[in-house]
Image (spheres, rainbow, N blue to C red):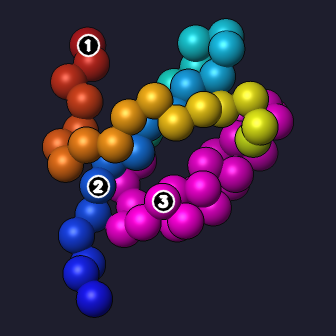
């Protein structure tokens, strides 16, 4: 089984973006849920916007 990590980026309609590293989409969904809870935003509000091998180069 491959242990390659990808960067998953999720965004909600208000423009809040969360990005993190995970080994699978399933793991990414679990992390997204915990991050959304920390932010006080329903996890359903976040949609997957990208999966990449390197982190995004934002500001």
What range of the chain is rendered magenta?
A: 20-42
Q: Secondary structure at mark 2?
A: strand
Q: Relative to 45, is 23 on the left or the right?
A: left
Q: Taking the image as drawn, is residue 38 in sight?
A: no
In the rendering, which numbered label is found on residue 3? none
In the rendering, which numbered label is found on residue 25? 3
Mark pair 1, 3: CA separation: 26 Å
Q: Which residue is mark 1?
A: 59
Residues 46 and 38: in front is 46
* Mark 3 crowdedness (10 Å alpha carbons): few <14, some 14-19, many ≥20: some
Q: Relative to 20, is 10 on the left or the right?
A: right
Q: Which residue is mark 2?
A: 6
Q: Taking the image as drawn, is residue 52 in sight?
A: yes
The residue at 36%/68% (across/down) is 23
Q: Quadrant of the C terminus?
A: top left
Q: Relative to 37, is 29 on the left or the right?
A: left
Looking at the picture, does residue 3 appear above or below residue 23?
below
């Amino acid at each position: 089984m491959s242990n390659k990590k990808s960067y998953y980026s999720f965004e909600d309609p208000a423009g809040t973006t969360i990005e993190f590293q995970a080994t699978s989409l399933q793991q990414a969904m679990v992390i997204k849920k915990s991050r959304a809870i920390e932010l006080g935003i329903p996890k359903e509000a976040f949609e997957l916007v990208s999966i990449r091998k390197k982190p995004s180069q934002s500001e």
